[in-house]
Structure formats: C-alpha cells, structure tokens
Image (tube, rainbow, N blue to C red):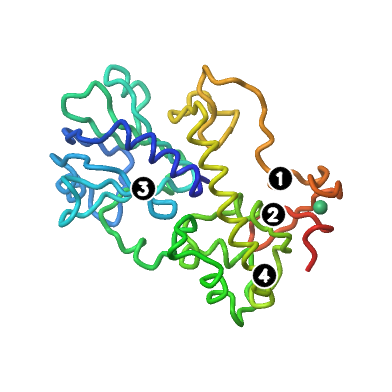
C-alpha cells in the first residue's frame, strides 16, 4: 500500500505534468471508485475544470481546480493497489483503465487503474478533516505533539503511529522502520516512553520519510506499472532504470536476516493483523 513517500513522489511527478490542463472528458468504468457521489454528480463537478496544482495530505492527493478556493479540490486515495499515470491517447484504452480523464489539447490521458478497488476519487473532504498533522511539518509535528498524544495512553506505540488521526501518512512499512531507528519495541505502551525517547522518535520519523521521498523522487519509476513485479518503491522501476538492488529497508520484510546494528536475527510478529518486524536485542520492551 502506498504511504506518504510514495504518494508524495507521485504528487511531484503529476504536479509537474498536469498543471494548467482542462478536463475534457471523464470515463468511469469502475463506479465504486467514485464515492459517495454518484458518477453523474462526479462528472458534473470535474468536467470542464482546469488543474491548478496538486497537493498532498497524508496519503491523499488533492487536485486543486480552477485556482482553488472557493472550488473544492478533487481528493484521490490510491487505496491498496491504485496506480495513476499518463498514457498517450492513442493507446490509452488498449486495456481499459478503471477511470480515465482526457485533457483538452493534450495527447495524453490521465488513467487510473485499481485492481483491488479500495481507492477512491471524491470531492468529499470529510476524510481529511480529522487527520493528524503532517509529520514533515515542524510547526505542527514535534516532540511536544508526540508527548501530548502519548501521555497516559496504554495503546501500543505502533498502533498509535499508524492511526491517521494522530499522524498523517504513516503506514505499516515505514512505522516498522521508524520504530527500529528509535529503538522502540512495537508493543511498547505509548504513555511509558519518556520525553528523550519521543525526541528520538520524532527525528526517526522525519529521517525515514525524508530519505524515502528523496529515493522516490530521484529514481526512474514506472508509474504505469508495466514493469510491475520488481516492486521497487511501490511503482517499480522504469525500463531504463538500473536494476541494481537497493537494500531499502532495515527491518521491514527481513525476518530471519541479521539486524543491521547488532546481527541478531530480525523477528516477525502480528500486531493488529499487520506483519511487524523488529530486532529483539535493539528494541526491548
Ligand atoms: Zn539489533
């Protein structure tokens, strides 16, 4: 599932190529992707609008139209498997995308493919209203904020960090990495972490996400996913990119492999039905 770094990488890519284009035609082949609006209402809201710029909030893309306010932005969530990419108009419909937006005066079509169908396109902003602060915004996300949300809480720190109303954009992959860097056991009750530990946690979140965004935006990615299978950075490498395998993760997906800090084999357990990877030596309860 794409998390903040993958969505931010896609945002930067799309923002650079979609600005200023006017929506000419919309094709919806998988109606459940548009909700709660009806497809007719959705087409009426999006049709004829011009893409002003593309923003991000947590794991959501916000497509600002016609110069933004008072117009509502189009909100896109990729769900578990969504892919959003431009394709030449001549072959845009070779395999029918689940949603397609043709742009005026442009030879490309913005295509959306979502095999599992958990993604969503909507003008309803209610899912953004309760969202926690952006972890890369130092004005709203800092150790004092972490202290405030952890204080007296018995919730496991891993569950708390994955809760979008507490911190926007983190998911299972990056939370595993963040907790390893912070030397915190994933089951540690949030309220038992002292202030210095929260300072380290805050730094680990920023470092992990910043490094991942840097990797994503500097890699030659295949947003369309024709090269899917190598799974690199969710999107996969484009055909021309070098195939050198990068050891992206320190613990995620590395059960049984040596911890990069102490060589103890990485363990895997389930927390809230999600695979959780940690070093039992570096991350004690
Ligand atoms: Zn270790």
Sequence-earlier tag: 4 or 1? 4
Helix, strand or loop status at disc 3: strand
Q: Residues within 10 Å of mark 1 (few under 14, many from 20)?
A: many
Helix, strand or loop status at disc 2: helix
Residue 250 is labelled as 1
Helix, strand or loop status at disc 1: loop
Q: Residue at image x 67%, y 27%?
A: 245
Q: Is residue 150 left or right of residue 90?
A: right
Residue 61 is labelled as 3
Q: Position of residue 64 (x, y in %)?
A: 24, 47
In depth, the one of 36 and 238 nearer the eye is 238
Q: Relative to residue 157, is residue 262 depicted above or below?
A: above
Position of the C terminus, as image quadrant, is bottom right
Helix, strand or loop status at disc 4: helix
1 and 2 marks in contact (CB < 8 Å): yes
Q: CA distance from mark 1 to mark 3?
A: 28 Å
Where is mark 4, residue-wise? 196
Q: CA distance from mark 4 to mark 2?
A: 14 Å
Q: Residues within 10 Å of mark 2 (few under 14, many from 20)?
A: many
- Quarter of the image holding residue 250? top right
Q: Residue at image x 34%, y 24%?
A: 87
Q: Position of residue 84 (x, y in %)?
A: 38, 36
Sequence-earlier tag: 1 or 3? 3
Q: Relative to residue 24, is residue 273 depicted above or below?
A: below
Q: Residues within 10 Å of mark 4 (few under 14, many from 20)?
A: few
In depth, the one of 200 and 57 nearer the eye is 200
Sequence-earlier tag: 1 or 2? 2
């Amino acid at each position: 599932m794409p998390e903040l770094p993958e969505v931010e990488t896609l945002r930067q890519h799309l923002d650079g190529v979609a600005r200023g284009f006017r929506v000419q035609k919309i094709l919806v082949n998988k109606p459940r992707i548009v909700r709660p609006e009806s497809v007719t209402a959705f087409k009426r809201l999006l049709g004829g609008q011009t893409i002003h710029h593309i923003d991000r909030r947590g794991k959501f893309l916000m497509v600002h139209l016609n110069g933004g306010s008072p117009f509502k932005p189009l909100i896109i969530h990729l769900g578990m498997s969504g892919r959003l990419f431009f394709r030449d108009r001549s072959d845009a419909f070779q395999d029918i995308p689940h949603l397609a937006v043709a742009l005026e005066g442009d030879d490309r079509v913005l295509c959306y493919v979502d095999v599992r169908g958990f993604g969503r396109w909507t003008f309803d902003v209610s899912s953004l209203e309760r969202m926690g602060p952006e972890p890369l915004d130092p004005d709203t996300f800092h150790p004092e904020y972490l202290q405030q949300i952890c204080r007296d809480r018995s919730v496991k720190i891993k569950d708390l960090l994955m809760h979008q109303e507490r911190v926007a954009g983190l998911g299972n992959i990056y939370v595993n990495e963040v907790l390893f860097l912070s030397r915190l056991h994933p089951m540690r009750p949030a309220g038992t972490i002292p202030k210095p530990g929260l300072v380290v946690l805050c730094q680990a979140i920023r470092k992990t996400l910043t490094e991942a965004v840097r990797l994503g935006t500097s890699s030659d990615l295949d947003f369309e996913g024709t090269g899917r299978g190598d799974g690199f950075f969710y999107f996969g490498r484009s055909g021309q990119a070098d195939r050198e395998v990068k050891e992206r993760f320190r613990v995620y997906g590395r059960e049984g492999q040596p911890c990069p800090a102490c060589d103890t084999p990485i363990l895997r357990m389930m927390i809230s039905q999600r695979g959780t990877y940690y070093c039992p030596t570096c991350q004690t309860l």
